[in-house]
C-alpha cells in the first residue's frame, strides 16, 4: 500500500430533513492509486454527487476519513471538480469562464493570458473564446468545463457524469479526449457515470455503489482500460455484463427491502 | 431602425395630443406646438435649472437605492439565518405606502434636497432590496458549487456569482423603480420648494400659464424617457447573456 493517493475510510454522511437525519453515505471505503482512473457507478440518487462534493471539499459535514495525498479535502488544493451540468457561468464568456479559476487564485495577469490561450488552443476552442455558454453545443460546453479545470493543473480531477447529456458520437470523442489528457498529464481521475460501457472503457478501478444509503459494494479491477482500443471487444462486453448483474443485484436488494 | 420607430411613435403621440386639444378646446390643454414653443423659451428662462435640480435628485436617489439595496439584498438572499431574522420586518413594512412619511421627513430633515432624496430612496430601495434578495435566493446552486470548486471564498462568490447572476433582475427593479421615483419626485417638489420641475409645473398652474405648465410636463416626460433609455441600454449591454439563455 502506501501509494494510494485517495484514501476513503468509513465515510458516513447524513442530511438533516426536518428534525431527523437521512443517511446518504454509509461506511464508504475505497482507495485509488496515483495516476489511475477510477469510475463510480451506481443507481440514481445513491449519493454519487454527494461523495464527489465531499472529496472536492465542498461538503464538510461528514464523519470518517477522507485523505488525498495525506491531506483533508479542504487542505488539499489541487482538486478540480466538473459538475453534472458543467457549472459554467452563463454570464461569463468562454474566455472568462476558462480563466476564472486562475483569476480567483490570483495568478499574475500575464500568466493568466498565456495559460488561457494555451489551453483553449489545445482543446480546439480558440475560435469560441468570446462566445457565451448559451451559444455553444453540449460537446463544446463540456470541453470548456474540462479546459477550465485543466488550466489549474490539478492533481486530482473529479467528474460528475461528464458525458451523460452528449450524443453517442460526441460522447465517444470526449472519452478519447479524456484518455489522451490522462496519458499526457498523468492525472488521477475519479469519474461518476450511469453508463456501464463508459465505466468499462475508462475505469481501471470500478466502484459499484448500492442504493441509498450508498456504500461501495464492490471494487472491480479492469486491466482492459489502458490503451483505449478495447471498445466492443469480447472481454469488455463480458465485464460490462458482470457489472450489469452486480447493479441489478443492488436494485433487487432495494426491491426486497421495500 | 429603432430611432425611426421612436420618432414615428413620437409624431403619433403629438398628433393625438393635438386632436384631443382640438376636441376639448380648453386653455388648460394647449396644442402641442404652443407647449413646444413655450418649452423652448422657458429653457433659457430657468427651466433648464429646474430640470438639472430634478435630475440631480432622481439620480442621487436611484444611486443610493442601488448602493444600499443591492448589497443588502444579496446578503439576505444568501444568508438563511439573517434573512429569517429580518424577513418579517421587511414583509410587514414593504406594503406600507412610504409616501405618507413625506410630512415627517419634511419636519425632521427640512425642506431641502435631503428630505426629498431620502423619501425617494426609501421607496425605490425597498423595490431593489426585495427583487435582489429573491433573485439571489433562487440562483442555481450549481453555479455556487462550481465556482467554489475553483477555490472561491465568500468575496469571490459575491463578485463572480451572486452579483452578476442577479444583475438582470437588479436592472429590471431599477427600471420599475424609475417610474416610482419620478412620481414621488413630482409629489415632493410640489410642496415648499422653489426648485425642480414639479415646482415649475405647479407654479405655472397657479399663474394659469398653461403653455408653461405643459412645458414643465414635457420636461418631466423627456427626463423620464431619457433615464429609461439609459437603463435600457445598460440592461442590453450588461445582460447580453440573458437574452441568449432561454
Ligand atoms: N442538500 C440536500 N439536502 C437533503 N438531501 C439531499 C441534499 N442533496 C442531495 N440530497 C439527497 O441525497 C441523495 C443523494 O444525492 P446525490 O445527488 O448525491 O445522488 P446521485 O447519486 O448523484 O444521483 P444522480 O445519479 O441522480 O445524480 C438523494 O436522495 C438526494 O435526494
Ligand atoms: Mg449526481
Image: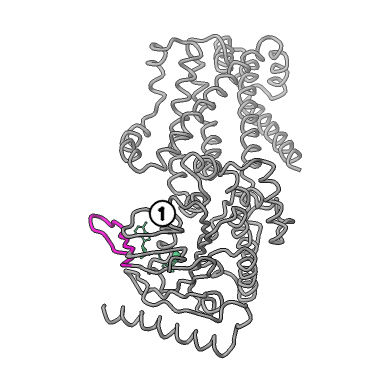
- Front residue of this view, candidates B3 and A20: A20
Q: Is residue B112 left or right of residue B24?
A: left
Judged from the image, the quadrant occupied by ligand 2 is bottom left
Instruction: State yes or no: Cβ of the residue under disc 1 lies below 8 Å from any atom of ligand 1.
Output: no
- Assign the N terminus of chain B to one quadrant of the image: top right
- Assign the C terminus of chain B to one quadrant of the image: bottom right
Chief secondary structure of the magenta span?
A: strand
Q: How many marks?
A: 1
Q: Over which residues does the magenta segment extend?
A: A11-27
- Front residue of this view, candidates A215 and B228: A215
* Image spot of residue A41 (x, y percent): 45, 74
The residue identified by callout 1 is A72
Q: Is residue A22 magenta?
A: yes
Q: Is residue B88 left or right of residue B122?
A: left
Report the colour scheme.
one colour
Q: Is residue A233 left or right of residue A221?
A: right
Residue sitting farthest toward the bottom: A234
Q: Residues within 10 Å of mark 1 (few under 14, many from 20)?
A: some
Vertical placement of residue B199 versus A37, above or below:
above
Residue drawn where x is 43% and y is 46% of the image: B137
* Image spot of residue A117 (x, y percent): 71, 52
Q: Is residue B203 magenta?
A: no
Q: Chain of mark 1?
A: A
* Image spot of residue B32 (x, y percent): 69, 25
* Image spot of residue B23 (x, y percent): 64, 29
Local secondary structure at mark 1: loop
- Front residue of this view, candidates B228 and A240: A240
Query: Which quadrant would residue B227 be assigned to in this image?
Result: top right
Amino acid at each position: 500500500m502506501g501509494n494510494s493517493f485517495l484514501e476513503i475510510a468509513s465515510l458516513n454522511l447524513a442530511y438533516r430533513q426536518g428534525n431527523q437525519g437521512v443517511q446518504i453515505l454509509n461506511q464508504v471505503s475505497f482507495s485509488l492509486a496515483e495516476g489511475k482512473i477510477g469510475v463510480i457507478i451506481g443507481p440514481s440518487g445513491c449519493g454519487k454527487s454527494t461523495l464527489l462534493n465531499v472529496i472536492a471539499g465542498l461538503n464538510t459535514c461528514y464523519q470518517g476519513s477522507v485523505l488525498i495525498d495525506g491531506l483533508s479535502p479542504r487542505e488539499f488544493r489541487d482538486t478540480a471538480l466538473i459538475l453534472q451540468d458543467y457549472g459554467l457561468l452563463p454570464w461569463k464568456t468562454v474566455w472568462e469562464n476558462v480563466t476564472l479559476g486562475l483569476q480567483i487564485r490570483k495568478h499574475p495577469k500575464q500568466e493568466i493570458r498565456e495559460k488561457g490561450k494555451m489551453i483553449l488552443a489545445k482543446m480546439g476552442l480558440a475560435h469560441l473564446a468570446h462566445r457565451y455558454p448559451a451559444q455553444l453545443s453540449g460537446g463544446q460546453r463540456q470541453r470548456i468545463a474540462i479546459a477550465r479545470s485543466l488550466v489549474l493543473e490539478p492533481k486530482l480531477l473529479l467528474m460528475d457524469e461528464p458525458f451523460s447529456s452528449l450524443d453517442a458520437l460526441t460522447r465517444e470523442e470526449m472519452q478519447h479526449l479524456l484518455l489522451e489528457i490522462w496519458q499526457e498529464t498523468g492525472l488521477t481521475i475519479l469519474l461518476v457515470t450511469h453508463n456501464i460501457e463508459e465505466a468499462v472503457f475508462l475505469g481501471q478501478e470500478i466502484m459499484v455503489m448500492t442504493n441509498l444509503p450508498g456504500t461501495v459494494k464492490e471494487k472491480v479491477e479492469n486491466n482492459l482500460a489502458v490503451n483505449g482500443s478495447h471498445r466492443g471487444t469480447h472481454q469488455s462486453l463480458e465485464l460490462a455484463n458482470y457489472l450489469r448483474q452486480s447493479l441489478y443485484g443492488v436494485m433487487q436488494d432495494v426491491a426486497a427491502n421495500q | 431602425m429603432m430611432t425611426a420607430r421612436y420618432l414615428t411613435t413620437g409624431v403619433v403621440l403629438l398628433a393625438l395630443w393635438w386632436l384631443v386639444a382640438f376636441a376639448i378646446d380648453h386653455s388648460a390643454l394647449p396644442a402641442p406646438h404652443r407647449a413646444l414653443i413655450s418649452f423652448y423659451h422657458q429653457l433659457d428662462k430657468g427651466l433648464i435649472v429646474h430640470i438639472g435640480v430634478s435630475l440631480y435628485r432622481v439620480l442621487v436617489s436611484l444611486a443610493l437605492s442601488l448602493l444600499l439595496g443591492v448589497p443588502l439584498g444579496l446578503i439576505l438572499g444568501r444568508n438563511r439565518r439573517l434573512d429569517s431574522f429580518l424577513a418579517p420586518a421587511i414583509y410587514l413594512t414593504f406594503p406600507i405606502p412610504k409616501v405618507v412619511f413625506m410630512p415627517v421627513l419634511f419636519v425632521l430633515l427640512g425642506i431641502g434636497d435631503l428630505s426629498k432624496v431620502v423619501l425617494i430612496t426609501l421607496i425605490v430601495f425597498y423595490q431593489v432590496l426585495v427583487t435582489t434578495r429573491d433573485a439571489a435566493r433562487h440562483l442555481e446552486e450549481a453555479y455556487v458549487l462550481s465556482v467554489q470548486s475553483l477555490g472561491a471564498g465568500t468575496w469571490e462568490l459575491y463578485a463572480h456569482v451572486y452579483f452578476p447572476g442577479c444583475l438582470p433582475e437588479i436592472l429590471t427593479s431599477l427600471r420599475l423603480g424609475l417610474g416610482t421615483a419620478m412620481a414621488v419626485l413630482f409629489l415632493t417638489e410640489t410642496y415648499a420648494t422653489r426648485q425642480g420641475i414639479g415646482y415649475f409645473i405647479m407654479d405655472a398652474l397657479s399663474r394659469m400659464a398653461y403653455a408653461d405648465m405643459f412645458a414643465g410636463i414635457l420636461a418631466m416626460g423627456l427626463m423620464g424617457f431619457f433615464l429609461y433609455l439609459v437603463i435600457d441600454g445598460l440592461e442590453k449591454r450588461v445582460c447580453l447573456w440573458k437574452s441568449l439563455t432561454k
